[in-house]
Image (cartoon, coloured by chain):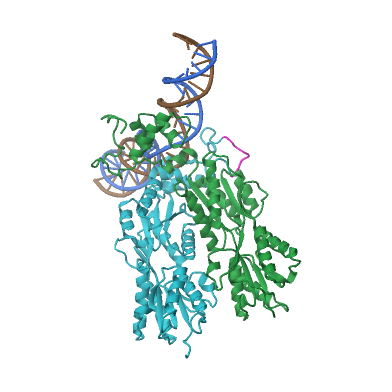
Chain colours: A green, B cyan, C blue, D brown
DNA sequence: TTCGAAAATGTCACCGGTGTCAATCCTTAT
DNA sequence: ATAAGGATTGACACCGGTGACATTTTCGAA
C-alpha cells in the first residue's frame, strides 16, 4: 500500500462487483485500472509491461506494485491486435513418429512454461500441393510469433523461402546446413551414424547391412554417410545389396529386413536409420527364426522410448529430442527479449549400448 | 464483379501497394474494406461473417461476393478481443502414453481442419497442488473457446467444478459417468475388459492374472470390473494375489509382471490394463524365460501403435482414440454453430486378436 | 392508401492494448 | 543562474472487430 485511497480516483477494477474486499477473481483488471491506481497514463503502464528501459525506476516500482496488487495480466488478444503479432508459437510437423512428435512438444512446452506464449499444432502434409499456401494462410490469419519446424518439414526449401517472405520468425531443426539461411537447431547425424558403425565394427562385425530412410530426407544421407565413413575406417564397406530403404516406418523396416535376410549371405548386423525401422527389423528377424543379438545385432537411431521397451532393449543412437525442442523454442523467444540470438545450436548424438548388439557368433 | 468501380468509394484494401491488378498478397483486407466496396456498414458485414439470419439474401450474396473478391478473412485476434472469447481449443492432458496423446491430437486436428479454431497444448500435472489454478489462469488470460479433457484429467472433479465456475465450454473423454455434469465422450471400458476376459476364458485359460492401472483412475476400475464379470460368467475368479498394480506405465508393467511370475503358481495369461503395461509384461515374461504366447498369453488395452509393433503382435482391446478426439472437438464446436449439442457420444471398444494369446499349453 | 410490426441495416462506443509524436522534467555544461 | 539536450511521460488515434440500441425498410392487413 504505497498510496492513500482516493475515493474518486482509486476505484477497484471497472467491474462494479465490489465483493467483500480482497476478492481474488474480481473481473480481470485492465491496463486502465492499473494506470488509474498508479496515477500514470496507460502508455507508461504499457512500457512497464514491456520492459521498456525508458521508465524511471521509481515509477516502475510503483506501477509494478499496483500490478501485483491487482493481479493484473495483460490481455494477449488485445496485445496481439495492436501489435499485429500473436502470442502463438506454431509447431509445423509431419514427422510420422509419435514418440518424436511428443518429445519435441514437451521440449517446447518446457521452454514456454511461464511465458505468455502458447503452443499451437499445425500438421503439414508435404504431399499436398498446397501445403505451403496453407501455412501462409495460417500465418496471415493468426500472425504467430514464430514457427518451429522439425524434420522433415525443416528440409522443405520452398516452404522456407515462403517463410522468409512472410512476416514470421522461425527455427528449424535439421541434420544439415540448409540452403535458406535461418536460425536452426542442428544435429550431427553423421557423427551418430559413425558411432553406430564404429560400435558394430568394434564388436567384430563384418557382414553389416543398413536400412535407411527415404532419399528425400537429408538425414537419410547424413546417417548413412557417417556410417559408411566409420566402416571405412575399419576397412569395411557397405555392399550395395546390403543397403535397403525402409521409409522411416515400421512396416518399411519389416520389408527391408526381410529383403536383407533373403539374400544368399545375410548380414550379421543391421543398422537401421531410426528406431521405428529397427523395431520392424526385430519382427522380420524373429519371423525368420533368428535370435537377437546372438544371430543378428541391430542398432537403431533416435532413442525414442520404444527402444527401451523392446526385448532385448535396442542399442541405438540417442538424440536429445526434448532438449532440442526446448532449445528451438528458446531460440525463438530470444528475439522477443531483444537479445542477440545465436544462429545455431548444435546437438551431438551419442550411442546408447543396450541388449540388441553383441559380437557376431563364431558360426 | 457485381458493381461498377466507383473511383472515390471503391478503393482497394487500405494498403496503397496497388500492384498490378490481381495481387494475391496485398496487405490483408479488413472488414472496413469489404463494407466500403459492398456499400453497407461494417456491422452488416459482421453479420454475414457470423451467419446471422437477419440479413436479406440479396445483401448477403453481394457481401459474400466482395469477401471472395478481396479474399477477406476476419482477424481472429480482433474478434477475440471484441467477443471476449478466443478461437483456441485447449487440450489439457496428463496422459503418460505418447501414442494416446498423439492420437487424440490428430483426431482433434481432423475436426478442426477448415475451421478458424486452433489447437493449443496445455499439459497438466495433477500432482502439483496448483494445477487447477494454472488452468484457471490460462482460461482467464487466453479465453479459450473450449477445452478438451482426456483421461485422467477428465476424472478430476475439483477441476471440473472450477471449470463450471469459469467461463468455458469443455468436453471430457472418460470411461464412466462423472459426477459433474458436462458433455462428454464416453467409452465403455467395462465392455472392453469383459471382452478381454471372455477371450482368455474361451481359449481355455484358468490361471489368469491382471495388471491394473492406478486406483485413482476410474478406468482402472471399469476395466477390471468388466474383466472380472466376464471371468465370472465362465465360472472363473480373479484371485486377489493375481491382481497387481502397474501404474499404467511401462516400468510399472515390468515390476507387476515380475511379481506375478514370482508366485508359487504363476499365471498362464495376463490381462494388462493398457498396452504400455502389456509391453512391460513382455519384457518381464521373457526375462523370466517364458515364451509368448506358448507359455503365457498377454492381452493389452488401447491398441496403440506399439501393439502392432511387438513380436508377437499384441492382442489388445481397441479404443478408437483418434475418432474420439475428433468427436470431442466436434461436440465442442457444435455450440458454436448454435446446434443443439448432444450431451454424450459413446464409443465401444472391441478386442483385436493378434499373436500374443493362445490356448494354454498342456503342461 | 395507410399504418404498424417485423425485418433489415446502421450508429457509435468500446474490447484492451500499442505506435507516434508532442510535452514536460531533469541534468549538465556555460 | 540558464539554456541545451536527453530522459520521462502523456495524448490520442487506431488495431479490426462486436454489442446494444436506434433507425429505416418492407410488406401484409385494415
User: In the picture provided, is A225 more to the left or to the right than B102?
Assistant: right
Specify the principal SS of the magenta part: loop
Instruction: Residue A22: give x, y in percent of width and height.
Output: 27, 41
Instruction: Residue B213: give x, y in percent of width and height.
Output: 39, 70
Q: Residue at x 42, y 76 (%)?
A: B259
Q: Residue at x 44, y 69 (%)?
A: B252
Please state the extent of the stretch shown in magenta in the rendering.
Answer: B16-24
Among all residues in the image, which is located at the extreme bottom?
A: B362
Q: Nearer the viewer, residue B341 or C17?
A: C17
Q: Residue at x 50, y 79 (%)?
A: B288
Instruction: Residue B155: give x, y in percent of width and height.
Output: 35, 63
Q: Quadrant of the N terminus of chain A?
A: top left
Q: Looking at the picture, does residue B45 appear above or below residue A198?
A: above
Does the rendering let one see residue A139? Answer: no
Among all residues in the image, which is located at the extreme right?
A: A235
Q: Residue at x 43, y 40 (%)?
A: A78
Q: Looking at the picture, does residue A182 appear above or below residue B285?
A: above
Q: Looking at the picture, does residue B14 appear above or below residue B176?
A: above
Instruction: Residue B26: give x, y in percent of width and height.
Output: 57, 41
Q: Nearer the viewer, residue A285 or C30?
A: C30
Q: Nearer the viewer, residue A292 or B16?
A: A292
Q: Quadrant of residue A26?
A: top left
Does the rendering let one see residue A57? Answer: yes
Amino acid at each position: 500500500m504505497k498510496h492513500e485511497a482516493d475515493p474518486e480516483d482509486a476505484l477497484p477494477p471497472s467491474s462494479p462487483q465490489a465483493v467483500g474486499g480482497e476478492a481474488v477473481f474480481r473481473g480481470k483488471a485492465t491496463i486502465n485500472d492499473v494506470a488509474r491506481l498508479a496515477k500514470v497514463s496507460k502508455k507508461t503502464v504499457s512500457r512497464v509491461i514491456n520492459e521498456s528501459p525508458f521508465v524511471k525506476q521509481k515509477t516502475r516500482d510503483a506501477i509494478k506494485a499496483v500490478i501485483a496488487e491487482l493481479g493484473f495480466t495483460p490481455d494477449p488478444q488485445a496485445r496481439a491486435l495492436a501489435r499485429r503479432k500473436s502470442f502463438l508459437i506454431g509447431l509445423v510437423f509431419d514427422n510420422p513418429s509419435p514418440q518424436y512428435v511428443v518429445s519435441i512438444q514437451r521440449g517446447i512446452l518446457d521452454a514456454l512454461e511461464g511465458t505468455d506464449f502458447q503452443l499451437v499444432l499445425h500438421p503439414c502434409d508435404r504431399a499436398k500441393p498446397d501445403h505451403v499456401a496453407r501455412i501462409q494462410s495460417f500465418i496471415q490469419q493468426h500472425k504467430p510469433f514464430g514457427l518451429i519446424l522439425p524434420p522433415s518439414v525443416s528440409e522443405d526449401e520452398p516452404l522456407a523461402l515462403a517463410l522468409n517472405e512472410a512476416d514470421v520468425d522461425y527455427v528449424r531443426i535439421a541434420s544439415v546446413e540448409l540452403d535458406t539461411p535461418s536460425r536452426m537447431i542442428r544435429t550431427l547425424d553423421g557423427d551418430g551414424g559413425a558411432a553406430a558403425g564404429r560400435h558394430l565394427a568394434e564388436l567384430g562385425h563384418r557382414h553389416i547391412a543398413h536400412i535407411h530412410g527415404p532419399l528425400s530426407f537429408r538425414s537419410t544421407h547424413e546417417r548413412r554417410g557417417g556410417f559408411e565413413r566409420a566402416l571405412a575406417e575399419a576397412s569395411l564397406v557397405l555392399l550395395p545389396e546390403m543397403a535397403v530403404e525402409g521409409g522411416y516406418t515400421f512396416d518399411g523396416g519389416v520389408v527391408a529386413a526381410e529383403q536383407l535376410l533373403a539374400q544368399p549371405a545375410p548380414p550379421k548386423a543391421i543398422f537401421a536409420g531410426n528406431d521405428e525401422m529397427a523395431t520392424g527389423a526385430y519382427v522380420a528377424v524373429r519371423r525368420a527364426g533368428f535370435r537377437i543379438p546372438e544371430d543378428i545385432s541391430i542398432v537403431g537411431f533416435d532413442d525414442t522410448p520404444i527402444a527401451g521397451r523392446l526385448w532385448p532393449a535396442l542399442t541405438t543412437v540417442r538424440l536429445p529430442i526434448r532438449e532440442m525442442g526446448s532449445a528451438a523454442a528458446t531460440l525463438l523467444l530470444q528475439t522477443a527479449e531483444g537479445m542477440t540470438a545465436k544462429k545455431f545450436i548444435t546437438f551431438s548424438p551419442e550411442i546408447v549400448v543396450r541388449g540388441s548388439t553383441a559380437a557376431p557368433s563364431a558360426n
